[in-house]
Amino acid sequence: MNKYKPRPWEAIAQTAKKLRAGMAAAIAFYTCLPVPLSWTLEFRGIARFAPLVGLGVGALLALFDALLHLLDMPILTRSVLIVGIWIAITGGLHLDGAMDTADGLAVQDPQRRLEVMADSRTGAFGTIAAIAIILLKTAALNDLDSSRAIALMAAATWGRWGQLVAIARYPYLKATGKGAFHKESMHSPWDLLPGLAIAIALSVIQGSVGGGDWSLAIGMASAGSAIAILTGAWFNQQLGGHTGDTYGAVVEWTEALLLCVLAGF
């Protein structure tokens, strides 16, 4: 008896359904944005969608920034509000990881670092890290009087691509945890390419709308990729691998440092 073979459009529909379930799960996991209860969520492999989620987060921030600009909001006030909205959209997920990572790295005994990072209480170094990240983002945005929309989308996208590199490249240090299922579902370096394509496309757009001046576009792509890769490599060097907290730290520090570089341009 011949086995039933799905028709081409049925296979396309099934693939689209899986992609929607993965994207919906990524939005639910990485942000506080509402997802319809009727949607199917597939959390396995959601890290692949993280750069696309970052693009969406950056686009929302750019929209809020444009609205505040129409209201003649001063640029410093706008920048503070945008950073606050940024934290609200993500629910502080990545910032919490950056804080826990800072507390862990402050411990001199390497054997105790993971134990300290798992503690829900925030220490002095975690608080300092959060303040530094927020101030860096706010100051950089305040100095960006143009190309703010592209800068926000690029920072959020490159930050999550850096997380993806850390997941694919380095060992996971805990048997369980929020980041464990990310590592389990990453099997190929090819998973990095879609997010990289999105991030580079933003630079191409910047060069196209920038009046033919491609220096900022090239700088954005070069700095974004370098910071995203090196940040994950540095945490791996300090800890011998990664955890869910360091994944969040990679996102936050890549975002903050890239915005600073773009402000320098």
Image (cartoon, rainbow, N blue to C red):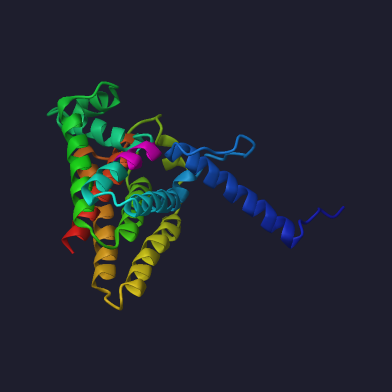
- Counting from the top left corner in percent of width and height, residue 138 is at 22, 46
Q: Is residue 202 left or right of residue 95?
A: right
Q: Quadrant of residue 88?
A: top left
Q: Residue furthest front?
A: 72
Which residue range is magenta in the image?
A: 84-90
Instruction: Give the position of the C terminus as an image quadrant.
Output: bottom left
Q: Position of residue 136 (x, y in %)?
A: 18, 46
Which of the two residues, 78 or 93, is positioned nearer the viewer here?
A: 78
Which residue is at 37% across, 45% downward? 167
Q: Is residue 257 visible?
A: no
In the picture, measured across the screen, residue 65 lies left or right of residue 144, that is: right
Residue 200 lies left or right of residue 119; in this view the side is right
Judged from this view, the residue extending furthest toward the bottom is 212
**Residue at left offset 73%, top offset 60%:** 9
* Secondary structure that dominates the magenta span: helix
The question of residue 63 being in magenta is answered with no
**Does the image show residue 202?**
yes
Q: Residue at x 36, y 74 (%)?
A: 208
Question: Is 84 placed above or below 109 here?
Answer: below
| Vertical placement of residue 261 versus 169, above or below | below
Outermost residue on the right side: it is 1
x and y percentages locating residue 114 in the rendered image? 26, 28
Q: In x, y percent, where is residue 93?
A: 36, 35
Residue sitting nearer the eye, 153 or 17: 153
